[in-house]
Amino acid sequence: MFMNTHGVNTLQSNEFAVTLDGEAIDTILSCDMFEYLTAAGDADKPFLTFYKQVEDSRDSVFNRWLGETLGSKEPSSRPRRTFVVTAVNDGNPIRRWTFAGSWIAAVAQGSLDSTSHEFAVERVTLGYDTISCELIG
């Protein structure tokens, strides 16, 4: 954990928004670190991993995409979407990463425990064609 001790206005990691083809996904809990600028350029794109609450609605934007993915026969025919992560500071968007041509590469179900009162969580890994970063603020 890093702490700002110099009085500089910096981004807190708990303020962010996520959209899938322009529709908000409010159940994302966290996104792992990802590279969007390297000395090698865009040579090897890593995957993006995030954690989200399991939704019970088949009509949610993510569950519709997951259903289409499960119905695809070949990995190459998986449906692709635009996944956007926007960093927010005090309610103002300041940086936006766009993962164009994203596809669901893997989904892992978290633990299910009948004695727990915690939300069910799944880990989702996305592949993508391109990533871009826009400085907004």
Image: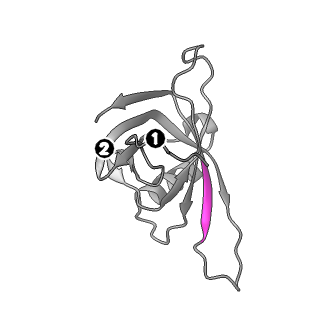
> In this rendering, is residue 131 above or below 109?
above
> Residue 129 location in percent, x, y?
51, 28
> In this rendering, is residue 26 above or below 132?
below
**Residue picked out by circle 1:** 6
Left or right position of 76 against 25: right
> In this rendering, is residue 120 above or below 24?
below
Which is more foreground, mark 2 or mark 1?
Answer: 1
> Residue 60 location in percent, x, y?
41, 62
In the displayed orientation, state which residue is furthest to the top: 40
Look at label 2 and name its amino acid.
Pro
Look at label 1 and name its amino acid.
His
How would you rate the neighbour count of disc 2 (Cα within 10 Å): few for under 14, some for 14-19, many for 20 or more? some
State the separation of the CA atoms marked 2 and 1: 23 Å
What colour scheme has been applied to the protein in the rendered image?
A: one colour
Q: Quadrant of residue 61?
A: bottom left
Q: Secondary structure at mark 1?
A: loop
The span picked out in magenta is 120-124
